[in-house]
Image: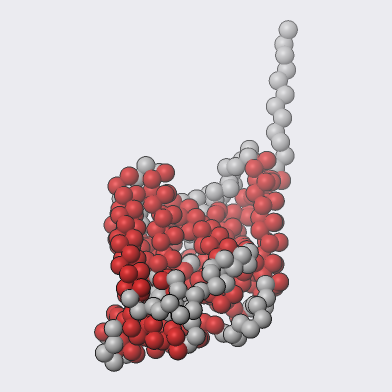
């Protein structure tokens, strides 16, 4: 094992500083494969007949539903009517989003909703500033990390996206991650449950948090996360029943959620969901891979939970997302790019350990 060197940007050595030479070489090989796999994003092509910007069509649908409720309609009747008018499928019941966001936005004045979104985004930024500040040894890398955080949150302060469920759920997941500590997890569970009640795919994040809490012996916390999943299960059952009351036998069914577009599509979705969208995909793709590597390098409980969450959604999007649901990447976009701030220490330590010469100790035997 190589002698550890002083951290470059961080206040503590990276996760890779103490690994063996063999393991460092294996991790470097895996990282090279990850970067190579990121270029698969260049070959992902939308199927023929797909809309040029499906997110805009969906956004129009969600805003139409909010307007219909504001005009006096009930959520399920308005949603069913809007889905039929837009030639959307109504079956199975998950084709209907949970009513939480639409009902709340319809109850608020138009101008209040963007302000609420901005306040949530500001809260997420402040919470992450407090968590990141002790991780970096100097002001410059901290500023870099905060700029990367802002780059990941660029889409989350656009007032024309307030009807998008993933915008709110992604911010709530980021806030839950920042607030969670071993001795203070109730607030994180609460925000995680809010995220699920807005977008049920946030259940993957909550499940990951429950498993990690159980694995680390935090039994009360694990029960808290599991209980929030129980609440979601009850809500989804009631939601399914309500949907069955407004769906007709002749209504269209969804083609399913088994896109099987692979890791390249996850990379493409993350590039489209962050400030990386301003770069050519050939440059943005490896930066997504390096962001993941950076999160894996941060030796902390928070770093572990972030990389586990990122990995879970990478699998979800790679296997089940369709070309027109790339915006699922918004669920983890806010914090993705911050991983680049941890990458310099992680890469330096990996290369240093992998290149270190094996020490041979010679002992002279005296007879």
**Residue at 51% across, 58% down:** 312
User: Residue reaching furthest top?
Assistant: 367
Residue 356, position in %: x, y? 70, 42
Using the rendered view, name the quadrant where residue 75 is placed. Answer: bottom left
Any part of residue 197 in sight: no
How is colour applied across the structure in the image?
Answer: secondary structure
**Residue at 69% across, 56% down:** 33
Q: Nearer the viewer, residue 35 or 4?
A: 35
Q: Nearer the viewer, residue 89 or 178?
A: 89
Residue 199, position in %: x, y? 40, 70
Image quadrant in which the C terminus is located:
top right
Residue 271, position in %: x, y? 59, 73
Any part of residue 289 in sight: yes
In the picture, measured across the screen, residue 72 lies left or right of residue 240, that is: left
Using the rendered view, name the quadrant where residue 53 is placed. Answer: bottom right
Residue 202, position in %: x, y? 42, 64
**Residue at 26% across, 84% down:** 107
The number of discs equals 0
In the picture, measured across the screen, residue 49 lies left or right of residue 227, that is: right
In the picture, measured across the screen, residue 161 lies left or right of residue 43, that is: left
Q: Nearer the viewer, residue 294 or 2?
A: 294
Image quadrant in which the N terminus is located:
top right
User: Residue reaching furthest front?
Assistant: 249
Rendered position, 198 above or below 204:
below
Q: Nearer the viewer, residue 21 or 58?
A: 58
């Amino acid at each position: 094992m190589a002698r550890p060197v002083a951290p470059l940007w961080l206040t503590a050595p990276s996760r890779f500083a103490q690994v063996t030479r063999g393991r460092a070489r294996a991790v470097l090989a895996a990282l090279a494969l990850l970067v190579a796999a990121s270029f698969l994003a260049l070959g992902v092509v939308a199927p023929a007949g797909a809309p040029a910007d499906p997110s805009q069509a969906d956004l129009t649908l969600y805003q139409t539903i909010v307007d219909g409720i504001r005009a006096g309609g009930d959520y399920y009747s308005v949603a069913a009517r809007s889905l039929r008018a837009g030639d959307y499928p109504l079956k199975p019941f998950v084709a209907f989003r949970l009513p939480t966001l639409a009902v709340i936005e319809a109850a608020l004045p138009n101008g209040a909703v963007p302000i609420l979104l901005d306040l949530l985004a500001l809260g997420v930024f402040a919470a992450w500033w407090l968590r990141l500040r002790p991780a970096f040894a100097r002001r410059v890398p901290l500023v870099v990390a905060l700029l990367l955080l802002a780059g990941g949150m660029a889409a989350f302060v656009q007032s024309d996206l307030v009807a998008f469920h993933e915008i709110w759920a992604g911010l709530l997941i980021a806030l839950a991650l920042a607030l969670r500590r071993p001795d203070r997890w109730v607030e994180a569970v609460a925000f995680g449950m809010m995220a699920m009640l807005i977008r049920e795919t946030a259940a993957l994040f909550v499940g990951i948090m429950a498993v990690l809490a159980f694995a680390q012996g935090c039994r009360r916390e694990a029960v808290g996360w599991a209980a929030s999943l129980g609440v979601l299960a009850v809500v989804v059952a009631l939601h399914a029943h309500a949907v069955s009351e407004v769906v007709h036998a002749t209504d269209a069914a969804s083609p399913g959620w088994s896109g099987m577009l692979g890791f390249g599509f996850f990379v493409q979705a993350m590039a489209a969901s962050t400030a990386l969208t301003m770069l050519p995909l050939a440059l943005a793709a490896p930066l997504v891979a390096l962001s993941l590597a950076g999160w894996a390098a941060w030796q902390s409980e928070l770093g572990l939970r972030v990389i586990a969450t990122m990995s879970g959604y990478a699998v979800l999007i790679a296997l089940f997302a369709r070309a027109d649901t790339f915006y699922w990447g918004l669920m983890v976009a806010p914090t993705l790019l911050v991983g680049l701030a941890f990458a310099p220490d992680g890469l330096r330590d990996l290369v240093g350990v992998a290149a270190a010469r094996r020490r041979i100790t010679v002992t002279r035997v005296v007879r």
